[in-house]
Amino acid sequence: MSLKRKDLISIAPLSSDEIMFILETADSFKEVTGREIKKVPALRGKTVVNFFFEPSTRTRTSFELAAKRLSADVINFSPSSSSVVKGETLLDTARNIEAMQADIIVLRHQAAGAAETLARGVKSSVINAGDGWHEHPTQALLDLFTIREKGLAFKGLRVAIVGDIAHSRVARSNIYALTKLGAEVLAVGPPTMMPASLEKLGAQVHYNLDKALQGVDVIMMLRLQLERQGRALFPTIREYSNLYGLTAERLRLAAPGALVMHPGPINRGVEIAPDVADSFSSVILDQVSNGVAVRMGILYLLSGANQ
Amino acid sequence: MTILIQGGHVIDPGRLNDRADVLIENGKIAAVGKNLVAYARGGASSATVIDATGKLVLPGFIDLHVHLREPGFEYKETIQTGTASAAAGGFTSVCCMPNTNPVNDNQSVTEFILDQARAAGNAHVFPVGAITKGSEGKELAEIGDLRRAGCVAISDDGQPVMNSLVMRRAMEYALAFDLPVIDHCEDLHLSEGGCMNEGLVSTQLGLQGIPSAAEDVMVARNLSLAELTGARLHLAHVSTAGSVRMVREAKARGVRVTAEACPHHFSLTEESVRGFNTLAKMNPPLRTWQDVQAIKDGLRDGTIDVIATDHAPHAAQEKQLEFAQAPNGIVGLETALPLTLALVEEGVLSLEAAVAKLTSEPAKAFSLPKGSLAPGADADLVVVDAQASWEVDPARFRSKSKNTPFAGWKVKGRVTATIVAGRVVYEV
Amino acid sequence: MTLGRAELMIAQDKKQEKLIMDAHEVARALTRIAHEILERNKGITDLALVGIRTGGVHLAHRFAKRIQEIEQGQVPIGELDITLYRDDLALKKDQPVLKKTNIPFNISDLKVVLVDDVLFTGRTIRAAMDGLIDLGRPAEIQLAVLVDRGHRQLPIKATYIGKNIPTSRDENVQVFLEEEGEEDRVVILNGA
């Protein structure tokens, strides 16, 4: 099998076989990241450009480390350090970057569709590192990798995704990926944070966290964008936290041994209680370290010669 | 100068729907009837004869909703290119919206537009004046002056009048001139940040949606205000099932309301946005299949009086922006005819009803002395080959901009000649 | 390098298969090499076997079994996937499927015997040595192969050889092993 794709823009078009193949490829890199010398020469001579329009130290660092461990050259571009000027379209800027012989462009952008637009316009491979509320495919893949690594099977797995679903690319990518692999996804949050027709994506919609958590195997907490307060989505952070925050007490409603996940960075005491974030159930730090292995896998699979 | 259009099928909505010749003299319709050859020969020896055998001969189309972009946005379109585009699409009269720079909220802008239109000579241009100064929704523009300068209606198009009191006053004030008040119905709070229809597709694409309710609540408000004031209300680009339902009900109650629908709103759905296609980005957004059906029903039963294009040219680089940042709108003048004829093919409209929605109905809505082939009327006509199949190629558009989602569509029905005031301005 | 099963069946229909070593000869060669390894390294102290995926892994296990029979001692076995060290990755359109490297012991200061089925250009062994050295600093790297078919492109030489087979470049040497459901044998498939 091989991933016959130039780009990784979204989970939506991937088959379950492709998703599993990416995870299996990442297994090899997980082994590499466990070595004393955590570096392989697979992408020697290749150039990876991290093109980040939104600040995200975490994701950018993860991609940077992944690329460096594959021996690629890495350039970091962000609007503050590059000359992204008004009037120049994203495509113009990207073509300039491509002219520097970038093999792979990793794009983080605040506009949904930016990665897809870019991928259509450049010959380089494009990896979507998050585009608006659309998708964040590598996050979903590293979440799946972590679930699988903990010995859970996807078929019949009950996963609750809790929080601001409407404005979350992480939620969308995970809903696509998990449902493709046969998991049952429960989207939990206030109705103001549920996007239209979510059920049609295969997720069950729940407004009551306590009810939704009954017997779930995995709880994915989403980060609450605190700046959304005052936009009539929820009254106060206090009330949000009371209704949708994950506490140790609530965690007991889930299946024994349930995993607690979070894409980070976490708002301690808002969507997740500090003792839960640090508990044995929490795999938040595994997610971070698996992120590097999964991204190495994706970079490797997309690094084939583009003809 | 005499033109004889011979052997065509003439449709003059409500007056004639039959094979006939049309004789044009001195820019006016001289006669419509059988065998006018002899009459022409007697009247003038130098008659130009257009053979319309197998073709339709119709009053020139009237578009109540176009953006000609001049003054201020000449890189998108000018009055010259916009009216050339109109002529190529069979439109002999267009009503241009006031959201230019400066806004057409005073006599001098209106006069400028009319001067440019006369110089271009491709089509009649009827300016629409602003409702409020600068279309800011606060103080009324000098509507009386605008009327005198030649505006045929008022609108703050693109900038809905959010303040209901201002809208009420505008409607009341316009009564003095019997001017139609046009509203682009959109509650800006409900639509804030939105860039496509709210629904499954917006959820999948992670784009902020604009709910149908953003249009519906303003349609409801405007209908209430029209009822209160007795004003002539014209609803621009109706896109939702809810709007159609409310307009139907208001008309039954006797509210003086007319409504227009755009070809893209009855030809496309939100599905066209997939792939973040900025050419499918417009405001109001493309809606669902159910909305499309409701619009067709509205066209069928007369709830929607008029087909208008909302011709909205944008430069290529603007449409290359990220979806949320790209401007709204598409060019529509050169694709309106085949998309309307598709409704005839589909059985939604009779051919005569379809023609009426492009001619007599818009004329009536804005009281324009157009849209008819009665003897003595201005000789604005279009000859159409309804059976001609062609592929939409934006590169061939007369418009300066090429932003259309219909590129590559195989369509049927094309204009073979357009005559404005007795002068052939477009001919294939 | 090794063909897949389905491809092979098609290949067998088309091509003449020339037997070079039968099951007995393979067994004898493996036994001999096992003895040679023990002789050269004076027993099993600090000895480790690392098979190159996939053919080399099976052979490494066979050597380990023979060594245990002879010396009554266990030699650690590792499995090495050299894909990430290949020198032709940048040229490929679709990246080869990775099989995990699994060397569950520290190779530093061990005498590591790399095991592969066929020694040809030497590029695989170059990649394997690079891969191995990324895992630690072995005291020594030795190379055991069942077949050496010549045509080296790098200055690499096997320490232990089951059989030297003179071939032409376009011939295809195949090692079949019981572990993959075949009868043990080495053949030459003619034609490119």
Image: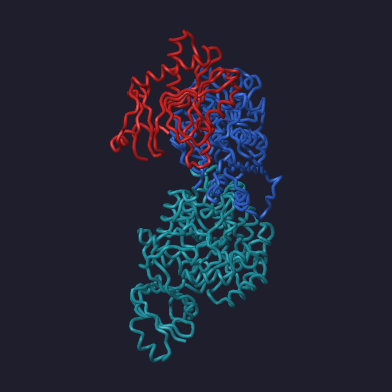
In this rendering, is residue B6 above or below B247?
A: below
Query: Which residue lies at the image location 57% right of the left edge and 21% below the top edge?
Result: C140
Look at the image and tell me in which quarter the N terminus of chain A lies: top left
Q: Nearer the viewer, residue B154 or A187?
A: A187
Which corner quadrant of the image does residue B401 belong to? Answer: bottom right
> Which of the 4 image quadrants contains residue C106?
top right
Q: Report the chain shown in blue.
A: A
Counting from the top left corner in percent of width and height, residue B348 is at 37, 58
Residue C33 position by quadrant: top left
- Report how many numbered discs are placed on residues in the image: 0
Most extreme residue toward the left, as rendered?
C13
User: What x and y, as percent, mark residue A165?
Assistant: 56, 35
Judged from this view, the residue extending furthest toward the right is A81
Q: Position of residue C42 (x, y in %)?
A: 53, 12
Q: Which chain is cyan?
A: B
Residue nearest the observer in this picture, B286 or C123: C123
Question: Where is A243 relative to B262, above or below?
Answer: above
Which scheme is used to colour this image of the protein? Answer: by chain
Q: Nearer the viewer, residue A265 or A127?
A: A127
Residue A78 drawn at (x, y percent): 67, 44
Q: What hue represents chain C?
A: red
Res. A211 in view: no
Say above or below: A221 vs A233: above
Residue B62 is at least partly visible in this image:
yes
Q: Residue at x 60, y 30 (%)?
A: A39
Q: Is residue B37 above or below residue B84?
A: below
Residue closer to the observer: B333 or A120? A120
